[in-house]
Amino acid sequence: MSTIRDVAKLAEVSTATVSRVINSPDRVSTKTRNRVNQAMKACNYKYNALARGFVTKKSRTIGLIVPAITNPIFAESTRGVQDLANNSGYQVILGNSYYQYDKEEKLLKVFRERQVEGLVITTTNVKGKVLKNLLDDGFPFVLLYSTVRKGPISNVGVDNFLGGYRATEHLIHLNHRSIAMLAGEFHFTDRSFHRWHGYKRCLKAHRIPYRSDLILQTQYSLASGRDGVKSLLSRKNPPTAIFCSNDFLAIGAIEGARELGLRVPADLSIVGFDDIEIASFMTPSLSTIRQPAYRMGELGAEILLNQIKNNFSGAVHKILETSLVIRDSTVKAPVRKKWIYEAKTISG
Amino acid sequence: MSTIRDVAKLAEVSTATVSRVINSPDRVSTKTRNRVNQAMKACNYKYNALARGFVTKKSRTIGLIVPAITNPIFAESTRGVQDLANNSGYQVILGNSYYQYDKEEKLLKVFRERQVEGLVITTTNVKGKVLKNLLDDGFPFVLLYSTVRKGPISNVGVDNFLGGYRATEHLIHLNHRSIAMLAGEFHFTDRSFHRWHGYKRCLKAHRIPYRSDLILQTQYSLASGRDGVKSLLSRKNPPTAIFCSNDFLAIGAIEGARELGLRVPADLSIVGFDDIEIASFMTPSLSTIRQPAYRMGELGAEILLNQIKNNFSGAVHKILETSLVIRDSTVKAPVRKKWIYEAKTISG
DNA sequence: TTGTACGCGTTATCAC
DNA sequence: GTGATAACGCGTACAA
């Protein structure tokens, strides 16, 4: 592999001139520039961006940590991060934490050793010491899918509380009174935790008693959704509707209900969270809370790159809007079940 | 940011010793090792993997190019690549080609400048000059989802021809005689092209005339599947079954049929290709050709890393097995339509 | 077991 | 407009 030194020798110029031809061609006379360009061709010279990064201390690389790239919502935001970063001359190293704190920690360490200039993280633990370390070091990073409104950490996300509230409210407006929640484990994702709070608050606002036996925390996966719904429906006074804290759980839940011989939405209404593209292609299509994932990725990268450029000029908190997308997986509560519920309430 | 020089000074040893503590701790006495380790803590020393790569000429990085990370099949193989690479101390830079040759070319250039040690590519153009250049330079790379059985290029994929054949055969065994194919554009993906060949061959083997008006090439997306099925069904002598060259198209097609008021599978059978996880969670669940995506990713990375280690010791061609997964989106052809078809054939 | 000295490919800072 | 040369942080002969 030839270097600028080889090129310089061949073109009979100094390495400095070759470097100039590469980085600021206008500062070199046309004549020598042409000679250098020819020499580069002749040598089959290939620019070494690593060596450049080494001296300029700019790797032009950022790290991106997602829980699992196989969840389309993260694939979509990843695309946003990549597109924006690439357009600014940055490359993206990708890692999956699989919702495991120690994996996240490990990735962070490796990425920093690799001299990434900053990080975009969908974290497993907002309170963890890994983030604190980053802060202490003044290392640029942005949290994705996070909702903190203040504090020293930059983040871009949606109002998960509000999203959970809206999803629940939608079901209540459809006369559901026995509404379960199939949630990602609060321990691993504060997103789910906040959505649960929105759910609870909404119940309260409508004077519907909160039933902890209608909450099931589980992993974020299709299979967990399928199994989870079976558990919820086997409990006494089963729900007529379920709010799932992401679309994977919701899609899994629809399948689980089907396996139990129930029809969605006739026998059971289901609302999800995310609005992954495929949600509108399901049968029934999925009612869900839409998150602007691609835009979130873009914004996260943009904020990070700004912080890198301006040496961390203060934390930025972007809360994007969610919206309720009403499709076919939610309908009015079956009258009979509603009656049973009311009878119980009155007698209790 | 402190360097090994700072650590060396503090620990009162040479930089060489610090380096040894990092890379071969057993070659350093316990006493000095401890002193050095303490000094590293005191300095808040962070290892610079880039500088190391610079001197050893090993970046411990590979590039991965996929058409679109938002297709779950690519997300899954990406996971395989990452997991295996990470376990071998390699990191992965990810890029989307969006099925565009020029983007693929651009990414390749950038990745090579970044000194990636090798590439895993799901290419848009097997015959393109970018791959030829890679070969000429003796640069390690592996093609994913590719099916070449010989030649100088390493690849791991499935037998797309056979997959297409099996999908078609399944429909024929169900008495379908009017079978359309909704395909990814041959120009952008030879996978789709080979599946089409399998489809044609199977038709021929069963003496079913090939009808070019039953072929629709389109983009690989849910929306294209939805729109494509409407086009196919609006043609005269419409099909009773459709083979879609990936699951996205198939899922889109099911929705499109539904919008036309047709039921799948009662009115129209649909078989896909990939077996993305969600395929078994659809209603109806999707009959499809299963590809071992995660394993392909793992294998691709393994082969690449071996080539890197052994200085390209000959091309490897891995053809993994596909299997037909029969679910609910395919059933026996409606008797009436079959009769119409036969009447036509006899009269013609 | 430990230290010295050099080199990796590039950019940046001076000179000219 | 161009050239000489010192960094950058680390690994690695080779010497001690």
Image: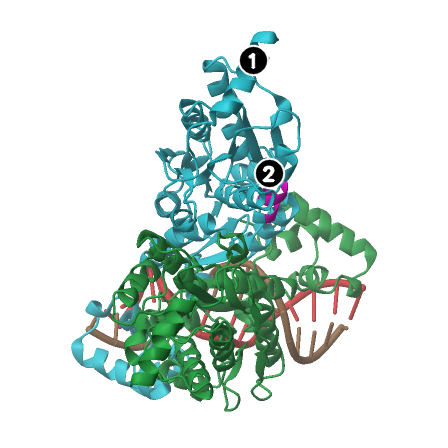
Chain colours: A green, B cyan, C brown, D red
> Picture coordinates of residue B139 (x, y %)?
49, 43
The disc label shown at residue B139, or none: none
**Viewer can see residue A261:** yes
> Picture coordinates of residue A102 (x, y %)?
30, 72
Disc 2 from disc 1: Cα separation: 25 Å
**Viewer can see residue B118:** no
In the image, what residue type sits under mark 1? Ala
Residue at far left of view? B30
**Chain at tag 2:** B
**Can you say whether C13 is above or below A116 in the image?**
below
As drawn, is B56 to the left or to the right of A4? left
Q: Which of the pair B90/B145 is nearer the observer?
A: B145
What residue is disc 1 on?
A: B343
Question: How many other residues sit within 10 Å of disc 1, few (<14), some (14-19) or many (≥20)?
Answer: few
In the image, what residue type sits under mark 2? Val
Q: Secondary structure at mark 1?
A: helix
Which range is magenta?
Answer: B223-227
Residue A326 quadrant = bottom right
Question: How many other residues sit within 10 Å of disc 2, few (<14), some (14-19) or many (≥20)?
Answer: many
What residue is disc 2 on?
A: B229
Q: Quadrant of the C terminus of chain A?
A: bottom left
Number of callouts: 2
**Of marks 2 and 1, which one's residue comes earlier in the chain?**
2
Main SS, magenta region, reads helix
**Can you say whether B320 is above or below B120 in the image?**
above
As drawn, is B41 to the left or to the right of A29? left
Q: Which of the pair B173/B312 is nearer the observer?
A: B173
Whether residues under marks 2 and 1 lie with C-beta atoms below 8 angstroms apart, the answer is no
